[in-house]
Each structure stands twice: as structure tokens, then as C-alpha cells.
Amino acid sequence: MEKVREELEAAGSFKEVFRLVKRVVEEKLGLRRAGLMLVLADAPAYVLAFHGVGTNFIVVNRRVLGALLSSGLPRVRLNSYLFTVLLHEYLHSLGFLDEQEVRRLVAELTREVFGEDHPAYEAALRPLDEMTVRRLMEASHQIGEGEPVLVRDFDDENLTYVA
């Protein structure tokens, strides 16, 4: 448990956090999926992230993420938030469509892997509510919308060579 805590705290990219998500799901549920892509896009405050059923995209709300990054939270809290969001959407991509079941699984997996005293478990139990998100976004002075951005090399574990 201590090793995965250290890895999450040290993670410096979406790719590194997502590798932990995939490892946890494979170890605990025996499930795996490759070839997902991460898109950062502007969305309303109540949408933290989503996975379109039948697609290979996970979309994270860029405005919420930007607000969190500018909030001054320690890296472990930011990575914990990102871990739970990516875990939630990864489970959807694996066919878990019932929202309550996915929330239960996210909480259960984070508790098993990180323990009840870790910020990831706290994030799993209490995802950001719309009011908190709006406050964060107002404090970060983020306005306007931009074009969606594809995060390169997000899930490249299935690649055997680079063309």
C-alpha cells in the first residue's frame, strides 16, 4: 500500500496517474482495456469528466482541472482527485454503466489500495460538488472556452513501436 501511495504522490503526468488506475483495476478486478485517449475540454461546472459509451475517449473538464491546479492544493490532493476521476471514467469504459455502482467501486478500490486515511479515499467518498467547483473556477479567473485538447501518449502501453 505504501508503494502505490508514493507513486501517486510522485506522479507528474496524466499518463503516470492513469497507469496506476489501470494497474489497480487489473489487480483488483482482473479487467483491462488499452487504447484510451484523454481529452481536456471546457464543460459546465457540474460535469467533472465523462466517457462516451462506445468511444475510446475520456474527457476531463479542463476548467475544473485548471481551477484545481491554480488553487494551491498539494500535489497528493491534486493527484488523488485525478486518480478518482480517471478511475471512475475508466470503469465506465470497461462497461460499468450504473453510476451508483461505479461510485461504490471507486470508493471500495481506493480504500483497499490507499487506506481510509488517504486523500484519494476522501475524494472518492466526496467528489467535488458544483458549489465547490464554481468557487474554484471563480477564484482562478478562468473564463471563456477553448478548443478541446488531446493529451498525447496518455495510454500508450499497447504500442509496440513508434512510427
Image (cartoon, rainbow, N blue to C red):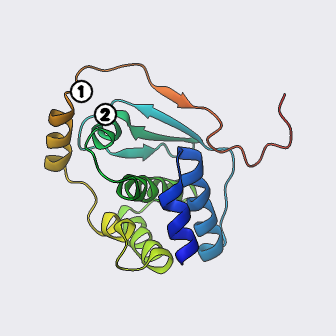
Residue 70 % position (x, y): 29, 38
Task: Report which quarter residue 77 is drawn in.
Answer: bottom left
Element type where label 2 sits in the image: helix
Instruction: Provide the residue designation for mark 1.
Output: 142
Q: Name the one closer to the observer, 28 or 16.
A: 16
Give residue 1's quadrant in the image.
bottom right
Q: Is residue 43 left or right of residue 161?
A: left
Type of amino acid at the residue the image marks with label 1: Gln
Q: Secondary structure at mark 1?
A: loop
Which numbered marker is on residue 63?
A: 2
Nearest the viewer among 123 and 8 is 8
Q: Position of residue 71 (x, y in %)?
A: 25, 43
Quarter of the image for residue 27 reads: bottom right
Q: Is 25 drawn above or below residue 80 in the view shown?
A: below
- Name the spot of residue 79 as percent of width and height, x first: 43, 54
Q: What's the distance in space between the residues labelled 1 and 2, CA to CA? A: 7 Å
Image: 87 above or below 44: below
Residue placed at 61% from the left, 32% from the top? 152
Tell me residue 90's x, y (percent).
53, 55
What's the amino acid at mark 2? Answer: Arg
Label 2: how many residues lie within 10 Å, few (<14), some (14-19) or many (20+)?
many
